[in-house]
Image: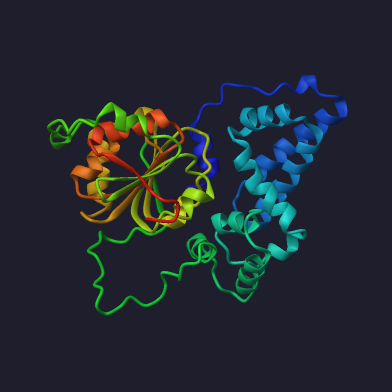
Amino acid sequence: MSKQDIVKQAEVVTSFDYDGLEPGQQSVVRQCTGEIKERLQRSAQDIWEVGQRLAEVRACLQYGQFDSWLQAEFGWSRRTAYNFINVYETFQERANLAQLNIATSALYLLAAPSTPPEVRHDFLNRAKAGEKVTHKELAQTLRGKPSSSSPRSSSQPAPPSKPSTTGIVKVIPKSADSRESPSAATSSPPSVPASELATIQPGWYRLGGQHVLFCGDTASDQFAQRVPQVAFALAITSNDWDHDWLIDQARTVTILAEADVQAGMVEALLQMFSNPQESVLFPWLPRADMLAIAHRLGRRVYAGDADPERCRAAVAAAGLIPQPLPLHQN
């Protein structure tokens, strides 16, 4: 599912104040608004064109006005807009992207200011030669790890898996049955001392010796580049979507509105799209019991949230003592 599809599901209750602009600025911004909406098709060339028009609007507006316009017209944060702008500013000629076989999230990462020029040049040459470039492979290169496309050792058996659903993003509408399943209720987990919960500040934590929790921005490279390939990702989010990298990182991604989610649904999705001992990903933690449910089902969880209170609530619900984790240790 594209960001546009997600944005369409959200109600935008604000409106941008075009009347507050000079006539010339108003004309440019209104025209660019319409053209951006027409070009949200997610091809490399469309992304370049959207970035070009976003840069034009940014030049017309002040800092706060640009943020207000993004939210009112598209429900976007600045991070989302700069994914497009970086592509435009990095690849000066739109025509250069015409024949590239490159995933959208990989294109954003290639254009990110943090990507070394030599890595960008190498992957662009590979794309021009007809090779498909994915976010996963590019991210692995950036963090210095070998590609998972390398042959698996004969002494390392493949884990059991569900039927392959690679590339599918499922969206459960509000009409979906969200009744609690009988097994959703469990005995209370061990209590985590308040002193332990108070230690959870921005940073990385190990929980129960098997789970990894990030208290911070899960749309950042700091989080995305540390998360391995997972069987299933559950994205419970609003209209502020900055996580395109999930599409390449998980075998199956399910996107839900926060109001739709019940514990029984979380459990059913985990059982449907993952097996015990497989890794799953929660890039948001709006429900305090999500981590607890996955822990009880024997999944290995990579989770995060920018809100420290949500992180503390998830740890408390799971009854797992948090241990600070060094930056480069999984």
Colour style of the rendered protein structure: rainbow
Considering only vertical position in the picture, is 58 above or below 43? above
Query: Residue extending furthest front?
Result: 195
**Residue 54 x, y percent position in the rendering:** 72, 41
Residue drawn at 15 percent across, 32 percent down: 185
Q: Residue at x 31, y 34 (%)?
A: 314
Is residue 258 left or right of 39 when viewed as pictured?
left
- Residue closer to the observer: 298 or 210: 210
Q: Position of residue 126 (x, y in %)?
A: 60, 73
**Quarter of the rendering containing residue 32:** top right
Q: Is residue 257 or residue 313 the one in the foreground?
A: 313
Residue 65 as seen in the image, left or right of residue 127: right
Where is residue 73? Give x, y as percent. 64, 31
In the rendered view, would you say 79 is above or below 123?
above
On-image quarter of the C terminus:
bottom left
Residue 103: x, y in percent?
Answer: 55, 60
Residue 121 appears in which quarter of the rendering? bottom right
Q: Is residue 174 visible?
A: no
Please state if 65 lies on the left or on the right of 266 as rendered: right
Q: Is residue 270 visible?
A: yes
